[in-house]
Image: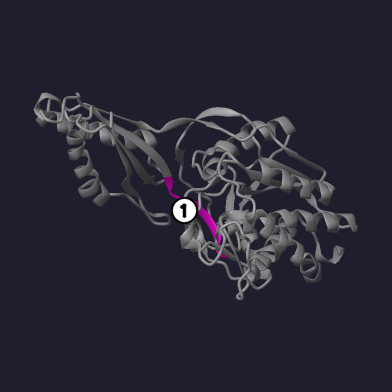
C-alpha cells in the first residue's frame, strides 16, 4: 500500500500546486470546482457532479452495506492582503521551497487537505478496480462559501443535495488544518450587529442633534471593560470571547452629526449558550443605559445578508456557527484513533479556536464529525501560508488507514 501511495505522490503534489494557482475567492470558486470535477470523472467515480449551489460531490460505492463516510473541505480562500508581504513568493504561484513546503493562498486552509481527500478517492478506486472490496460508501465533497462563515454551501449539501441524491452520512471527516492531530469540536461564533440611533445636525452646532456615536460609547465601554472580562469557560473548548471588529457612522459625511452608529461584534460562545441569550445580554444593557439617558435608542440582531454562489443560487443567511463537540469516547472516534496509531502516528485530541462547517454537520445535523489534516493552523490566512509535502503525504497514509478500518478494507485484499 505504501508503494501505491508513493506512486501517486508526484501527481498529488502537482495537483495541490495547480489548485493553489487558481484564485478561488468566496463566490468565485467555479473554475476550481470544474477542475476538481474533471479529475474525479477521470478517476472513474461511481457518481461525480456539481450541485445547484456549486459544491463538487463524488461517490465510490462499496460492495456491501456499511458506513457512509463524508470527506469534506471547501473550495474558497480568503483574500491575499498586501501582496508585498508575500515576498519572495507569489500567493498564487504554488512554489516549492528547499524545505519541501508548497507556498500560496489556500495551501494550509485548505487546498493541501482537499487534495489529499481527492487522491484518497483515487486510491480507493484503484484498489477497487484491482479487486478490493469494502462496506459502505465514501463520499467526497468540496463546498462553496465556507470562509464567509454562515454555512451557505454545506447547508445546501446536507439539506438539498443529499436528500435529492438519496445520500446519507454516518461520519464526517473535515480536512481543516490539524497538523496530523484529531480535532473534535470548536466554539460557536455569531456576528452581532448593534446600532445606536440619533438625530442629524450641523457639526457646528452639535447640541442641536443627537450624536449616535456618542450614544455608542457606553456600549463600547461595557464590551471592552466588563463583558470581555466575564466570559464563560469550557473544560475542552476554553474561554468564550467578545470583541468589536468594525464601526461605521452614517450618514458618514463631514460637518454632520451622525444619526446612526453601527458596530460589528464577534462573539465566540459555548455549548449550552444560545444566540438568543447572547442578544438578550445587550437588551438588558440598553435598559440600564436608558435609566441615565432617556434619549438612548439602540437595536441588536444577528447579521443577515443575501449570499449568491457562482452558480447564481441565492439565499438569505445568518452569520453564525454553533458550537459542537464530538465525544472522544464515540466508537468512530476510537476507531479513527486506532487507525492512525496503527501506522505510527501519535495524534493529540484538540479543539479548534476558529469556526468550520462542522457547525452544520455536528451541531445542527447531529453527525459525528472529526477534523484531520496534514496542514497547519498557524499558517492559515497569513502571507506565509504553506503546506509541508511530507505532512500531507503522512495525512494520506492516515486517511487510508482510517477508511480501511471504518469501511473494513482488509490489507490482504491488495
For the N terminus, give its image quadrant.
Answer: bottom right
Residue situated in front as seen by the camera: 204 or 20? 204
Image-based side of 403 in relation to 74, left or right: right
Dot 1: element: loop
Where 287 falls versus 28 (above or below)?
Answer: above
- Which residue is most to the bottom? 98
Q: Position of residue 325 (x, y in %)?
A: 50, 50
For the C terminus, give its image quadrant.
Answer: bottom right
Identify which residue is drawn at 90% across, 58% down: 130
Q: Which residue is mark 1?
A: 81
Is residue 177 in sight in this rendering? Answer: yes
Residue situated in front as seen by the camera: 237 or 379? 379
Q: How is the image coloured?
A: one colour
**Quarter of the rendering containing residue 293:** top left
Is residue 116 in sight in this rendering? Answer: no
- Dominant secondary structure (helix, strand or loop) of the stretch shown in magenta: strand
Q: Is residue 311 magenta?
A: no
Where 123 falls versus 101 (above or below)?
Answer: above
Q: Position of residue 148 (x, y in %)?
A: 50, 42
Where 215 falls versus 68 (above or below)?
Answer: above
> In the image, which residues are magenta?
179-188
Q: Position of residue 135 (x, y in %)?
A: 79, 50
Identify which residue is drawn at 46% across, 30% down: 305
Amino acid at each position: 500500500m505504501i508503494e501505491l501511495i508513493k506512486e501517486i505522490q508526484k501527481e498529488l503534489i502537482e495537483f495541490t500546486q495547480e489548485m493553489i494557482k487558481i484564485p478561488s475567492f468566496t463566490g468565485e470558486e467555479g473554475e476550481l470546482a470544474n477542475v476538481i470535477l474533471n479529475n474525479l470523472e477521470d478517476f472513474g467515480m461511481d457518481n461525480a457532479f456539481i450541485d445547484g449551489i456549486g459544491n463538487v460531490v463524488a461517490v465510490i460505492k462499496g460492495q456491501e452495506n456499511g458506513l457512509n463516510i463524508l470527506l469534506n473541505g471547501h473550495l474558497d480562500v480568503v483574500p491575499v492582503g498586501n501582496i508585498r508581504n508575500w515576498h519572495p513568493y507569489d500567493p498564487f504561484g504554488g512554489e516549492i521551497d528547499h524545505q519541501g513546503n508548497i507556498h500560496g493562498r489556500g495551501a494550509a486552509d485548505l487546498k493541501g487537505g482537499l487534495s489529499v481527500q481527492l487522491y484518497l478517492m483515487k486510491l480507493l478506486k484503484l484498489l477497487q478496480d484491482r479487486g478490493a472490496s469494502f462496506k459502505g460508501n465514501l463520499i467526497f465533497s468540496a463546498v462553496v462559501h465556507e470562509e464567509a462563515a454562515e454555512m451557505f454551501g454545506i447547508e445546501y449539501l446536507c439539506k438539498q443535495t443529499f436528500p435529492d441524491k438519496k445520500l446519507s452520512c454516518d461520519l464526517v471527516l473535515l480536512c481543516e488544518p490539524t497538523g496530523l492531530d484529531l480535532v473534535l469540536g470548536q466554539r460557536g461564533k455569531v456576528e452581532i450587529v448593534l446600532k445606536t440611533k440619533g438625530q442629524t445636525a450641523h457639526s457646528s452646532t452639535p447640541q442641536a442633534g443627537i450624536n449616535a456615536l456618542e450614544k455608542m460609547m457606553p456600549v463600547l465601554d461595557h464590551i471592552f471593560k466588563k463583558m470581555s472580562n466575564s466570559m464563560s469557560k469550557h473544560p475542552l473548548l476554553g474561554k468564550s470571547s467578545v470583541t468589536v471588529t468594525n464601526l461605521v457612522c452614517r450618514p458618514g459625511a463631514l460637518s454632520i452629526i451622525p444619526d446612526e452608529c453601527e458596530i460589528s461584534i464577534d462573539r465566540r460562545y459555548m455549548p449550552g449558550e444560545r444566540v438568543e441569550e447572547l442578544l438578550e445580554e445587550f437588551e438588558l444593557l440598553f435598559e440600564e443605559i436608558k435609566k441615565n439617558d432617556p434619549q438612548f435608542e439602540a437595536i441588536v440582531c444577528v447579521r443577515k445578508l443575501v449570499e449568491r454562489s457562482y452558480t447564481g443560487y441565492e439565499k438569505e443567511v445568518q452569520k453564525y456557527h454553533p458550537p459542537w463537540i464530538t465525544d472522544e469516547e464515540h466508537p468512530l472516534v476510537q476507531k479513527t484513533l486506532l487507525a492512525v496509531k496503527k501506522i505510527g502516528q501519535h495524534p493529540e485530541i484538540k479543539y479548534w479556536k476558529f469556526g468550520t462547517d462542522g457547525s452544520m454537520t455536528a451541531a445542527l445535523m447531529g453527525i459525528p464529525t472529526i477534523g484531520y489534516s496534514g496542514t497547519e493552523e498557524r499558517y492559515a490566512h497569513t502571507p506565509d501560508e504553506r503546506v509541508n509535502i511530507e505532512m500531507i503525504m503522512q495525512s494520506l497514509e492516515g486517511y487510508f488507514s482510517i477508511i480501511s478500518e471504518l469501511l473494513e478494507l482488509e490489507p490482504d485484499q491488495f
